[in-house]
Image (cartoon, rainbow, N blue to C red):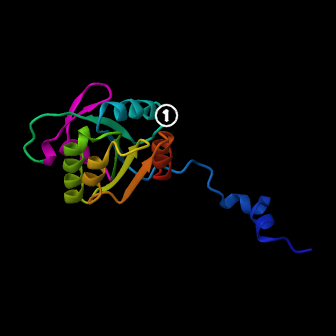
Amino acid sequence: MQLSECARATSASESRFRITVPIAPARAARVIALDPVAAAVTRRVAAGLWASARFYTCQDGPVDGPEALPLRGLDGSRAMLGEVLTGSDVVVVVATEDSGRACAAAIGRACSARAVTTAGVVLGDGFEADDAVAALRPHARVLLLSADESDVSELLTALRV
């Protein structure tokens, strides 16, 4: 009797070829919340086990170019967008309404200039964030409109963060 490919792959003789360690994260991700409700979602998501993600909220304030956009880590630390983008290869922007549209545009421009992949998750069940979506659209490779905040975690998992 000849074994199928699946049966042969699970045999003891083939086990020496199996990878026995967890796959390392592929992305150095930054997750940036644009508004207070998005910040609350981001805090809940940040409580998960993420190998290389760092989480921030966008701060309003005078900006001398996108790189100088002020951000705040979830621990309260301050950072500029340019510093945050150094070493990152994907940025996930989370919005629930339009108050962060200027931040969204600045993040999109800075990421485009550095060739950093940008994804946007806009949470809500209506059109509360139309301006944020419009600001992200030219820059985001992935733009997910969802009513389910668990989609933020799902996106990070899919990106292997």
Residue that carries the numbered disc 1 in the rendered image: 48
Q: What amino acid is found at the position of numbered circle 1 in the picture?
A: Gly
73 is within the stretch colored magenta = yes
Residue 37, image x and y in percent? 36, 31
Around disc 1, counting alpha carbons within 10 Å, would you say few (fewer than 14), some (14 to 19), or many (20 or more)?
few
Q: In this view of the protein, which residue sits in the foreground, 56 or 35?
A: 35
Residue 11 occupies quadrant: bottom right
Farthest top residue?
76
Q: Is residue 13 above or below residue 106?
A: below
Q: Residue at x 40, y 51 (%)?
A: 27
Task: Determine if residue 45 is in view.
Answer: yes
Residue 103, image x and y in percent? 21, 43
Q: Residue at x 27, y 25 (%)?
A: 76
Residue 130, image x and y in percent? 30, 49
**The residue stretch that appears in magenta:** 66-89
Q: Secondary structure at mark 1?
A: loop
* Residue 141 falls left or right of residue 64: right
Q: In this view of the protein, which residue sits in the foreground, 55 or 33?
A: 33
